[in-house]
Image: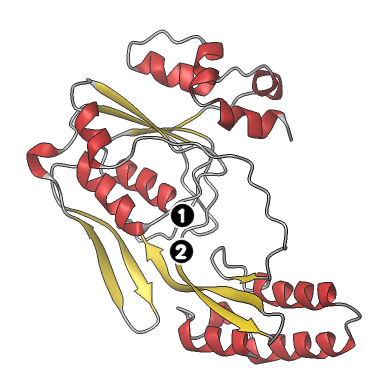
Amino acid sequence: MKLKDEIKKNYYDPNYRGMDRDARFQVASDKIKEAASIGQILGIIAQVLIEFDDSHTFFLPPQHQTKVDYGWTMRVIGDDAISRAKKYKGLILDLRGNGGGWVSTMKRLVANFCDHDVKIADSKERKETKPLIAKTRGDKTYTGKLTILVDSDSASASELLARTMQLEKRGTVIGDQTAGAVMTSRQYGYQTGLDVVIFYGVSVTVADMIMPDGNSLEHHGVVPDEVRLPTAEELAAGRDVVMSYAASLHGVTLDPIEAGKLFDFQLKRFSTN
């Protein structure tokens, strides 16, 4: 089985987090032989990877033929955004619902907020452990007051950023405990078939991230400095009381209704579920 071999070769922990890898895959193989449909087979494969209890190791099943685009949003990011922010005394960084992204982007953000080089974490791989360092941008860094908003959907790189700001005492983190899905992974793709080609793959965790305090955020997440949660009624009404409160910390009066209009797509994903 290709997925089994990929995990054997690339998974960051040679002990597979205490799991008997061969035994688990053998059970899955036996179930596949008795499966009555392709859907059951895909479910069996997905389940054996879920049992790793690892946020970044999972099955990438064949995609549906029909793809639905629900729209997208755009925001200014990167050095340009920080350059624009420098003229303001305070900055609110909203990471709610942010599932993460490129490590290089996260490192650059840390570099934009700290006036010195920062070790974000140690990347613990199978054969070595390497420090993850953000090189400061020096006099180009943003030095104003920083407030970071997080929730239970803030994951991966966004969690690393929030926790780094806490450990560096650089900013205040407000909101809900984050997802606790903080690993580094790589995706490996395959295909099968001749006339009809089916594409599938697997995401394999290649490194755990150990913070400077010696802890991993995986399954733990970031505990905010101050817990602030909207009620179901406030979400349904489009009232972003968390953003409103964060603004008040910067001396700005922002009505929760008006705050909800700033990033209304965030509230809609809750109020429509």
Judging by the rendered image, the residue that carries numbered circle 1 is: 156
Q: From where the camera sits, is residue 19 visible?
A: no
Point out the image quarter for the C terminus.
Answer: top right
Q: Which amino acid does label 2 sit on?
A: Met
Image position of 51 with respect to 152: above or below: below
Q: From where the camera sits, is residue 176 visible?
A: yes
Q: Which of 249 and 186 lies nearest the eye of the viewer? A: 186
Q: Looking at the picture, how far across and down is residue 139, in whole percent?
A: 8, 38
Give the image quarter of residue 266. Answer: top right
Q: In this view, does 148 lie to the left or right of 199?
A: left
Q: Is residue 44 left or right of residue 228?
A: right
The disc, 1 or 2, on the residue closer to the chain's N-terminal end is 1
Q: Is residue 35 left or right of residue 14?
A: right
Judging by the rendered image, the residue that carries numbered circle 2 is: 183
Image position of 152 with respect to 102: above or below: above
Q: Which amino acid does label 1 sit on?
A: Ser
Q: Looking at the picture, how far across and down is residue 89, in whole percent?
A: 22, 20
Q: Looking at the picture, how far across and down is residue 85, in whole percent?
A: 24, 27
Q: Are marks 1 and 2 in contact (CB under 8 Å)?
A: yes
Give the image quarter of residue 250. Answer: top left
Q: Which of 37 and 180 lies nearest the eye of the viewer? A: 37
Q: Which of 117 and 256 lies nearest the eye of the viewer? A: 256
Instruction: Give the class, few, some or many, for how many residues have Cα within 10 Å of label 2's Cα (few <14, many ≥20).
Output: many
Q: In this view, does 246 lie to the left or right of 177?
A: left
Instruction: Give the class, few, some or many, for how many residues have Cα within 10 Å of label 1's Cα (few <14, many ≥20).
Output: many
Residue at position x 12%, y 38% from top? 140
User: Element at badge 1?
Assistant: loop
Point out the image quarter for the N terminus.
Answer: bottom right
Q: Which numbered marker is on residue 18?
A: none
Q: Looking at the picture, how far across and down is residue 97, in whole percent?
A: 53, 40
